[in-house]
Amino acid sequence: MSSREKKMTFGEAVKEAMAEEMRRDPMVVLIGEDVGPAAGVFKILVGLYDEFGPERVIDTPIAEAGFVGIGVGAALTGMRPIVEIMFGDFIALTMDQVVNQAAKLRYMSGGQAKVPLTIRATMGAGRSSAAQHSQSLHAWTSHIPGLKVAVPSTPADAKGLIKTAIRDDNPVIVYEDKMMYRLEGMVPEGDYTIPFGKADVKREGDDVTLIATSSMVHVALNAAETLAQQGISAEVVDPRTMVPLDREALVASVSKTGRAVIIDEGHRSFGVTAELASVIYEGAFDYLDAPIVRLGAMDVPVPFTKPLEDATIPTEKDVVEAVTGMMK
Amino acid sequence: MAVDKQLTLKMYRDMLRIRRFEEQIWNVYTLGLMHGLAHLYIGEEAVAVGVCSALRDDDYITSTHRGHGHCIAKGGKLDRMMAEVMGKVTGYCRGKGGSMHIADMSLGILGANGIVGGGFGIATGAALSAKYRKTDQVVACFFGDGGANQGIFFEVMNYAAIWGLPVIYVCENNQYGEYTAVNKVTAGKHIADRATPFGIPGRIVDGNDVIAVYGATAEAVKRARAGEGPSLIECETYRYRGHHVNDPGLAYRSKEEVEAWMKRDPIERLKGRMLAEGQAREADLSGIDEEVQKEVADAVESAKASPYPDVKEVSEHVFA
């Protein structure tokens, strides 16, 4: 791990991870819609096309099933492609390739096949983009054996997890909350990777554990700051990868604090918060001083207009209220 | 086209290996020696053998749910295939895939596929990979008339055309997608015509004539290796048996239709041709059949004698 750090945005960290891996390994290519001269719709890919050219930064037609399937076939035959799903919602168009092909080929072939494919997809509401450009669908792919799933929350985690994803010999889906692309943070320079399945304690505390994913980590950190002013010490734990999941770290933290609030931007029902809550109930039930509180996106399609959209996403206020409620 | 005697004899032997293998699958099924179902390739042997005879050992194929023939034609080992169909640990996939998922990565067999049209993305990606890695490899993507109506077929033809990928889409038009006649559910005259709007050469061949299939494929392979891009070949053929081993295949097809196609049997036609042209004698060919029958019988015995995987293997191979 490098000791030098540089301030950069989340989007710059994503790009740096890819650029470094592309320099290191000629089998790494980026495939997706508008990833070339346009530098992506979120403009985070600036410079990649100039450095690596059209053979390695490959613009595709708007045909997601096709290019994800092509990524699977290329991965199966010696390459390490990164495919980009511009809006995570479009992963719905690729589900046969992701679920029935990429996730299954190794197992179905009795361990013969290797699919080192990285799928980068965005997630997250907050841009008034309405119901087909705002979903956080990471629970879907976390449900399928054979897929690894990363949900970075900081620029440093984005770099480290994406580099690990590209080097992994399995299909990995990295969900990037598009609301964080301009978020700044210190990022280790050079060859910085983060092992999958290692949660990160983003803030230490004693009274309650806030388990949060992706952009919800920042909601949790802000809430922890507010709670500190009220004399409540909150620990913020970021699992960083859904698959593999660092169950031990979640159980250890809640065993220490005795309380847990879980915050995730996926829909509340049948999702990440439910899974993480069951991990804690199974591993730390005897230590709990209060029922676990789950905060997820409301179970409605994401609405367009700002006042309605904002109402669907967990907020700092929701977290603070949940904690003060359980401390009574 | 002129094909030398050795290759012709090999094609004859490989078609027979497929036929006898599939006949044994039927026996194994009826004797209760396998779980689940299998989709037999009997009647379509000329397609797999004609195509794979035009490929190099390091070329790739993607296959379908009706994939035993493709696998054998590309060099798959009969004992490991039979063991896989029976769910044994000595099978290609250690019993985890079964009939619909046989793969041999070392032979470029990127897998049969249980999803109709499931090979389109993989084949096209393998072709991108071959082009990117500058290996000169080509990919043959087998699919059925049923797969020709999946949306991703049109997506990949577009990709292969714009990027000039070395892939040959081989449609086995066996006239029925599962239980439904192709002409009831497929617009246009020919599936091969679907290549035209993409600027891809599309041609129709007699899929029961192994030499014709071989010739058409050899031409497409030459194009692909020369960097001239993809091709689509529609092979008109027929499935003698039902959709799978438990389907008699007569509720939706007439006996007359089946019999008419059986008169165009691909193996008998090649045999007649070889005898007429003096490339082989009757005794040579029956000798080949005896050898093949023994090879298949040995595969069955070896598979029967093999153990099932230990239950602890259930959690292995989820991840690399």
Image (cartoon, rainbow, N blue to C red):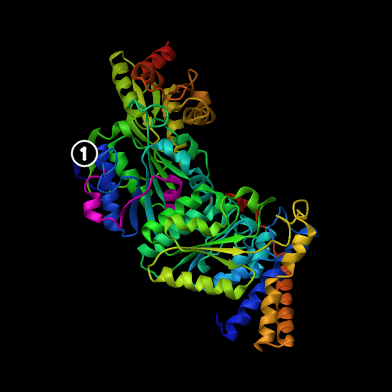
Judge left or right: residue B8 versus residue A130: right
In the figure, B208 relative to A144: above or below? below
Q: Position of residue A172 (x, y in %)?
A: 42, 46
Q: Residue furthest top?
A: A328
Quadrant of the snapshot with the N terminus of chain B: bottom right
Q: How many marks?
A: 1
Identify the image quadrant of residue A128: top left
Closest to the observer, B13 or A283: B13
Q: Residue furthest front?
A: B189
Judge left or right: residue A43 versus residue B242: left
Q: Is residue A4 magenta?
A: no
Closest to the observer, A94 or B291: A94
Closest to the observer, B145 or A313: B145
Identify the image quadrant of residue B51: bottom right
From which residue to which does the magenta span run? Answer: A45-72
Q: Position of residue B94 (x, y in %)?
A: 61, 59
Q: Is residue A60 magenta?
A: yes
Q: Position of residue B319 (x, y in %)?
A: 49, 51
Q: Residue at 60% of width from left, 86% of height from top?
A: B5
Q: Position of residue A163 (x, y in %)?
A: 33, 48
Q: Residue at 38% of width from left, 19% of height from top?
A: A319
Three-letter code, disc 1: Met
Closest to the observer, A317 or B117: B117
Q: Which residue is mark 1?
A: A8
In the figure, A194 relative to A130: above or below? below
**Mark 1 nearby-residue class (10 Å; few <14, some 14–19, many ≥20):** some
Residue A90 seen in render:
yes
